[in-house]
Amino acid sequence: MPRKTGQSKPPPLVKAGCGVRFDPEQLDEDTGFDFSGAADLLEEEKAQQEIDKSEQETLTADEKNPAKAGQSAE
């Protein structure tokens, strides 16, 4: 079964030193990238990493001292 390809085409590229980049003359409001939510996403990601780190530290502390974690050390 053949797969359907995307409907949009990438904007034209121009040479730029040792790489390529989009041709700025071909970009308009409908082409390009929207990074308006990037800062908010970064803050959410940092907050989640802090939560994960805190949870991992709690788990590690509980493993070292099971009596404090509500488990009896026998």
Image: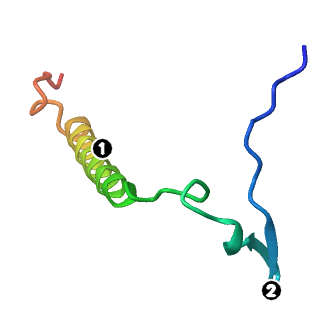
Left or right, residue 6 beside residue 56: right
Residue occupying image coordinates x 81% and y 25%: 4
Left or right, residue 71 beside residue 15: left
Which residue in the structure is indicated by mark 2? 17
Q: Quadrant of residue 63?
A: top left
Q: Quadrant of residue 37?
A: bottom left
| Residue 67 percent location from the top left of the image | 11, 30
Q: Secondary structure at mark 1?
A: helix
Residue nearer the viewer, 33 or 69: 33
For mark 1, does the 10 Å Cα neighbourhood hold few (<14), some (14 to 19), or many (20 or more) residues?
A: few
For mark 2, does the 10 Å Cα neighbourhood hold few (<14), some (14 to 19), or many (20 or more) residues?
A: few
Kind of residue indicated by mark 2 = Gly
| Residue 10 percent location from the top left of the image | 75, 53
Q: Quadrant of residue 17?
A: bottom right
Which residue in the structure is indicated by mark 1? 52
Residue nearer the viewer, 57 or 31: 31
Q: Are marks 2 and 1 in contact (CB under 8 Å)?
A: no
Residue occupying image coordinates x 20% and y 36%: 62
Give the residue furthest to the bottom.
17
